[in-house]
Image: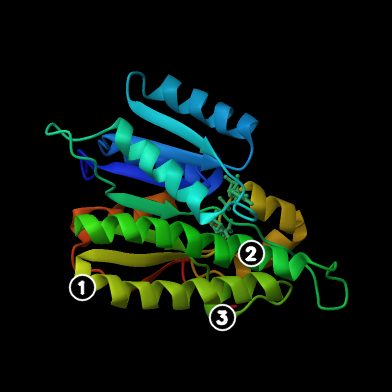
């Protein structure tokens, strides 16, 4: 398909690499009017912007930097408002059509060896960060009476993670947040859904797993392979688009049927 996102302004956290970067690419391929990517480092933001601008010359692509562990809601909201002020419709009206909250961190520790503060940090970035992004997006979309928010859960939030209590807890929280905000914002024609990826071939996965561990993981997946970021990105595009007009408060597994 092409042009699923025609005319849409899309704001993506975690857009500098991995699933977020792949989602930014797919949004542009699908004709998005403008895409904002957020990174927590200026250098990674600039590298991602350079790559996107080379591939999609002349398109509306902008970058912002904030650290979800510490950024205030006001700072996050100011970035969204700045973004949409740059790309109004032909009548000069601003619009925020989709927000993909993809930024996140993981950890790989048992309760015996997890460093002090790691559980808290993971929950701060993954759950509280998603909440702050969603709230600011939701307030804008509630007022305009449409929009789509797509969060990032994980199958670890559904089935648990044997070496990631903080990660599993944070992603379980994202699932509850998504279902609750979806119910609340449905009254305003705003859809809130989440993608729950299985294992994806990204820096995060490579950091947490040895090659031997990856072989074991593949054995737990019915499709016998991990996914590529683009395979996750396509679900973000679908849920962000009007094609998903009847999807509300849902958690969409993209996991190749992972059984453990
Ligand atoms: P990645 O490490 O490649 O990318 C993570 C992104 O989040 C980066 O753009 C990074 O800049 C951003 N980020 C991290 N900490 C941040 C902070 N404090 N403030 C702002 N931005 C921050 O990871 P990925 O694999 O692409 O993961 C993307 C999302 O998908 C995450 O939410 C992750 O939990 C989730 N997920 C990944 C997998 C997997 O197997 N890789 C599986 C399930 C869910």
Mark pair 2, 1: CA separation: 28 Å
Residue 62: percent from the left, percent from the top?
43, 31
Residue 55, percent across and down? 41, 23
Q: Residues within 10 Å of mark 3 (few under 14, many from 20)?
A: few
Residue 3, placed above or below residue 187:
above
Q: Is residue 46 above or below residue 21?
A: above
Residue placed under numbered mark 3 in the picture: 159
* Residue 72 occupies quadrant: bottom right
The residue carrying mark 1 is: 187
Image quarter of residue 199 = bottom right
> In front of the other: label 1 or label 3?
1
Q: Earlier in the sequence, mark 2 or mark 1?
A: 2
Position above or below: 134 against 17: below
Label 1 vs 3, first from the N-terminus: 3
Q: Which residue is mark 2?
A: 124
Out of 150 and 224, give the one closest to the viewer.
Answer: 150
Q: Is residue 244 left or right of residue 44?
A: left
The structure residue drawn at horizontal position 41% and vertical position 71%, both measured from the top left corner, is: 178
Q: Residues within 10 Å of mark 1 (few under 14, many from 20)?
A: few
Question: At 79% from the left edge and 67% from the top edge, which residue is drawn?
Answer: 117
Secondary structure, mark 1, is helix
137 left or right of 164?
Answer: left
Residues at marks 2 and 3 touching, judged by CB atoms closer than 8 Å: no
Q: Residue at x 32, y 25 (%)?
A: 59
Q: What is the crowding at mark 2: few (fewer than 14 residues within 10 Å), some, or many (at least 20)?
A: many
Residue furthest toward the front? Answer: 74
Element carrying mark 2:
helix
């Amino acid at each position: 398909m092409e042009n699923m996102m025609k005319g849409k302004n899309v704001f993506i956290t975690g857009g500098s690499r991995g699933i977020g970067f792949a989602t930014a690419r797919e949004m542009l391929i699908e004709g998005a009017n403008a895409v904002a990517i957020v990174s927590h480092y200026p250098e990674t933001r600039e590298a991602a912007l350079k790559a996107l601008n080379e591939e999609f010359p002349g398109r509306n692509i902008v970058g912002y930097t904030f650290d979800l562990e510490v950024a205030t809601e006001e700072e996050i909201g100011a970035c969204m408002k700045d973004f949409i002020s740059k790309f109004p419709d032909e009548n000069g009206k601003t619009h925020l059509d989709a927000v993909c909250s993809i930024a996140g961190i993981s950890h790989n520790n048992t309760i015996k060896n997890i460093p002090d503060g790691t559980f808290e940090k993971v929950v701060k970035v993954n759950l509280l960060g998603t909440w702050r992004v969603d709230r600011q997006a939701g307030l804008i979309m509630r007022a305009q009476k449409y929009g789509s928010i797509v969060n990032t859960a994980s199958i670890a939030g559904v089935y648990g993670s044997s070496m990631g209590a903080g990660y599993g807890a944070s992603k379980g929280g994202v699932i509850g947040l998504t279902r609750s905000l979806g119910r609340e914002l449905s009254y305003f024609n705003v859809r809130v859904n989440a993608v729950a990826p299985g294992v994806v071939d990204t820096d995060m996965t490579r950091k947490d797993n040895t090659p031997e561990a990856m072989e074991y993981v593949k054995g737990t997946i019915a499709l016998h392979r991990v996914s590529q970021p683009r395979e996750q990105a396509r679900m973000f595009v679908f849920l962000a688009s009007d094609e998903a007009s009847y999807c509300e408060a849902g958690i969409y597994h993209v996991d190749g049927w992972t059984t453990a």
